[in-house]
Amino acid sequence: MKWLAAALVLVLAGCHQAGPEAASTASTAVETPAPQGPKRHVLAIGDSLFAGYGLASPELAYPARLQAALRARGVNADVANASVSGDTTADGAARLGFSLDGQAVKPDLVLICLGGNDMLRGLPPTATRANMEAMLTELDRRHIPVVLMGMLAAPNLGVDYARAFDAVWPGLARRHHAVLVPFFLSSVMARGDLRQADHMHPTPAGVEAIVSGTLPVVMGALKRAG
C-alpha cells in the first residue's frame, strides 16, 4: 500500500495536462431497467478521479457509472459531473457556487472528490481543510447534504504531513454531518489490473469496482436526503 500511495505524487502531476491515450478496456456496464420514483439530482464536483482522466469517454467516468448503477437499482438518479482534472480544493471552492447555480434543479446531494492535487503541490493541510470547510459551509447554507470522498497522503511526504492531511476528511464530516467514504480509491489500490498504466487512475473496470464500493454509501445518503 505504501508504494501504491506514493504513486499518487507522481501521477497527479499530469492531471492538469492533456490525458494519456484513451484506455481500450471495454466498460463492464450492466443492463439498467427503467428507474422508478421521483428524479434524484446529484452533483459530482472533483478532480481527475471524477473527470475520467485517461478513459475513452466521459460516459466511463465515475459519475456516469454511478448514475447507471443507481438506476439499475431503481433509483431515478441524474448525476451531473462538474469535475476538472488538476483541480485543487481552492479551485473547487472557487467554482462551487457557479456549479450549483448552473444546475437546472437544486441538487438533492453533492459528491466531493478533491485534495489529491493539494498533496501533490505540497499545500499545507490547513489550507486544504479551510477550502473544504468553505465548500461545506456553503452547502450547509443551501441545505444540500454531502458525501465526502476521502483521500490519504503519500507516505513519502512524512508522518506529520500524512497525519494532518488524512484527518481533514473525517474531521469535516463530523463537523458538518456529512457522509464519509474514508478512501475513494480503496477498491483499486491493491489491484494493478484495475489501474491504468500510471498506477493510480482507475481503468473502466476499476471505475466499476469503485462504484460498487461506494454505491451503498451514496444510496444511503440519498435515502436520508429524501
Image (cartoon, rainbow, N blue to C red):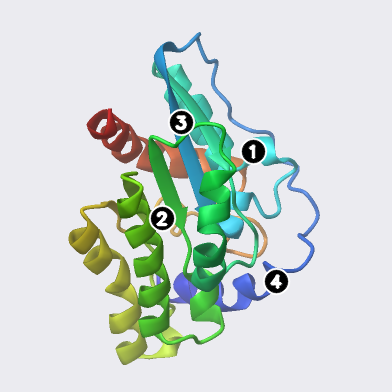
Quickly name the residue at label 3. 41
Local packing at callout 3 (Cα closer than 10 Å; few below 14, some 14-19, many 20+) is many
Local packing at callout 2 (Cα closer than 10 Å; few below 14, some 14-19, many 20+) is many
What's the distance in space between the residues labelled 1 and 2, CA to CA?
Answer: 17 Å
Quickly name the residue at label 4. 14
110 versus 171 height, above or below? above
Q: Nearer the viewer, residue 153 or 199?
A: 153
Local packing at callout 4 (Cα closer than 10 Å; few below 14, some 14-19, many 20+) is some
Residue at 61% in and 58% down? 48
Labels 4, 3: front one: 3
Ranked by sequence position, the earlier of labels 2 and 3 is 3
Name the residue type under label 3: His
Residue at 50% in and 8% down? 34
- The numbered mark at residue 60 is 1
Residue at 57% in and 68% down? 91
Percent x, y of residue 134 = 38, 67
Name the residue type under label 1: Leu
Percent x, y of residue 22 = 77, 49
Quickly name the residue at label 2. 184
Local secondary structure at mark 3: strand
Ranked by sequence position, the earlier of labels 2 and 4 is 4
Q: Is residue 81 visible?
A: yes
Labels 3, 1: front one: 3
Name the residue type under label 4: Gly
What's the distance in space between the residues labelled 1 and 4, CA to CA?
Answer: 20 Å
Q: Can you say which quadrant of the picture contains the N terminus?
A: bottom left
Count of numbered circles on the image: 4
Ranked by sequence position, the earlier of labels 1 and 4 is 4
Local secondary structure at mark 1: helix
